Amino acid sequence: MPMNVSWDDDEKTTLRCDYEGKWTWSDVSQGYDEVIKLMKTVPHPVSMIHNMTHGAGIPNGAISNVHRFTAHLPENWGISVVVGSGAFIEMLMSVFTKIYKKLGERYKRASSLEEAREIIRQTAQKIDSAE
């Protein structure tokens, strides 16, 4: 499957979406059904890693489709971190955060899975210390 969804940690605080080869928004729609199902199995916040290091580009309509999928995530969604962001993905993320400011604050970029996990850890610590 072009989008594989799995827990990234044993505590079930992070979901990882691995994009493989050429994929479509229909593939993402099927993957997001699994994302939502898994997120609803836990009461705590769940962040997401979108691992695009093995993907073959992004189909047209990225900004509107990302907004559509994000709008349907459960309330326990934390943040999303995009890994493998080349110049085109970075430009799309920049445009997305300008159009959808509030949602855009919940999207980050990382150059590796390790960096993405660290961003999620730091964000969770900030939220915990603010409460």
Image (cartoon, grey):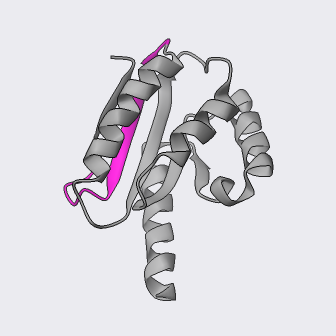
Q: From the viewer's perspective, tell me whether residue 10 is left or right of residue 39.
A: left
Q: Is residue 83 above or below residue 128?
A: above
At which x and y percent is residue 4?
33, 28
Residue 86 appears in view? no
At which x and y percent is residue 131?
46, 88
Residue at 68%, 18% in the rendered image: 60
Residue 13 part of the magenta-drawn span: yes
At which x and y percent is residue 122?
49, 69
Q: Quadrant of residue 128?
A: bottom left
Q: Is residue 70 above or below residue 43?
A: above
Seen as rendered, the residue at the extreme top is: 22
Residue at 69%, 34% in the rendered image: 63
Residue 14 part of the magenta-drawn span: yes
Q: Which residues are magenta?
A: 8-22
Residue 105 appears in view? yes
Residue at 50%, 68% in the rendered image: 123
Q: Quadrant of residue 102?
A: bottom right
Identify which residue, 116 or 46, lies in the foreground.
Answer: 46
Q: Is residue 48 above or below residue 60?
A: below
Identify which residue, 25 or 20, lies in the foreground.
Answer: 25
Quadrant (top left, top right, bottom left, bottom right) of the N terminus: top left
Q: From the viewer's perspective, tell me whether residue 117 is left or right of residue 42.
A: right
How many dots with numbers?
A: 0
At which x and y percent is residue 58?
61, 21
Residue at 60%, 52% in the rendered image: 108
